[in-house]
Image (tube, rainbow, N blue to C red):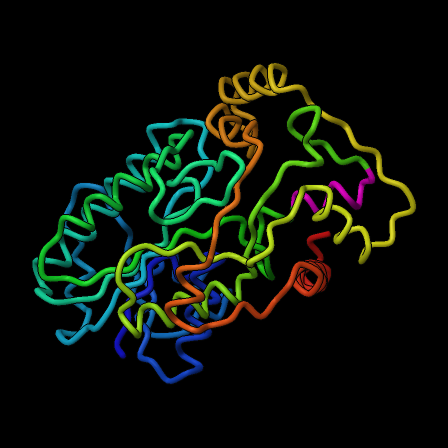
Amino acid sequence: MKILVTGATGFVGSHLTDLLTSEGHEVYSLVRNPKKAAEFQTQGHIVVGNLDATNTLEWIDVLPENLDAVIHTAGVVHSVNPDDFFIHNTKTTNNLINQLHKKYAHLHFTYISSLAAAGPSTGEEKCEEHDKRPVSSYGRSKLESEYHLKELSGWTYTIIMPPMVIGPRDTAVLDIFKMVKSRFVIGPGINFKNKKYSFINVFDLVDAIKYLTIEKGSGSYFISHPRSITFVELINAINKNMGMKRLFFIPIPHPLLRIVGRILTIFPVASRLTSDKVHELVQENWICSPKRYLETTNQVIKFDLENTVKMTQEDYEARKWL
């Protein structure tokens, strides 16, 4: 198949282009920075361009007339300005869809959304048929583009909503590994150790993305490991590999966390903690069910938490990130 992958130098996008090209697909990798693409050894045909929210995307002209599919992984995950999510997630995605639709009457579009678009769970696992109630601007920006994609005629589409993604090259979960190495683990809320999360290994995720794109999987899917974990289980799995003798857990009460989030939003400090992110951190459960994906495709999830943590730490150490 001929497949366009946006965000090809990103965490998920880079693994995806590796997989697709290794299996013989003709991949067109959209990158903003060709120097970064060369440094990352990005696979596929390099297409240099950006995802402007309003202008014509001239780089579309270089794509083949018989393009089969688009996998849209690009997007903004962290920003101190909530409006950035709607500019760089919603508007850019909608413009990409509209511009591609002018050239391609028939196409399969796979959109990598997020569990954040569905919102936290209230005790039971989120399923695809449950109401979507995002609590953050990030989640709402992803959900708005889901609606736009569903309204488009002539295309087939797949919407994939992964939870926490862990694996080599990830810079987000790196912060948790660094906390364990420092022996001081800070968490949101008095009960943060028992908060529940779904997770997925990045290799299982890109396998699912590839399968659902090629098979034109219809509708929305949660892709996660069947077993959810608590935060302390994640910490213990990381510590098992690092072998730190004793960890100190420091809970940050939710009201204080909200104050810190506002302060870091006002002042230009490089931090993943923002007021918008706090809306997600204070939730008790971010768990979803992969039942629809597993039962309708007969695919399997290969990597458990222990294997995932081990390969991720080895990658971090090889890159000298820890």
Give the image location of residue 258, x and y in percent: 56, 18
**Residue 49 quadrant:** bottom left
Q: Between residues 292 and 197, which one lies in front from this camera angle? A: 292
Asked if 59 appears above or below 28 in the picture, the reply is above
Residue at 22% in and 43% down: 147
Residue 32 seen anywhere in this rendered image of the structure = no
Residue at 32% in and 54% down: 220
Residue at 18% in and 47% down: 95
Q: Quadrant of the N terminus?
A: bottom left
- As drawn, the residue found furthest toward the right would be 245
Residue at 69% in and 23% down: 252
The answer to if 159 sits in the magenta stretch is: no
**Residue 264 quadrant:** top right
Give the image location of residue 175, x and y in percent: 65, 43
Q: Which residues are magenta?
A: 175-183
Give the image location of residue 53, x and y in percent: 22, 42
Q: Tally the numbered discs.
A: 0
Give the image location of residue 32, x and y in percent: 35, 55
Q: Between residues 169 and 121, which one lies in front from this camera angle? A: 121
Dominant SS of magenta comes to helix
Left or right of 136 in this view: 70: left
Q: Between residues 254 and 88, which one lies in front from this camera angle? A: 254
Left or right of 83 in this view: 36: right
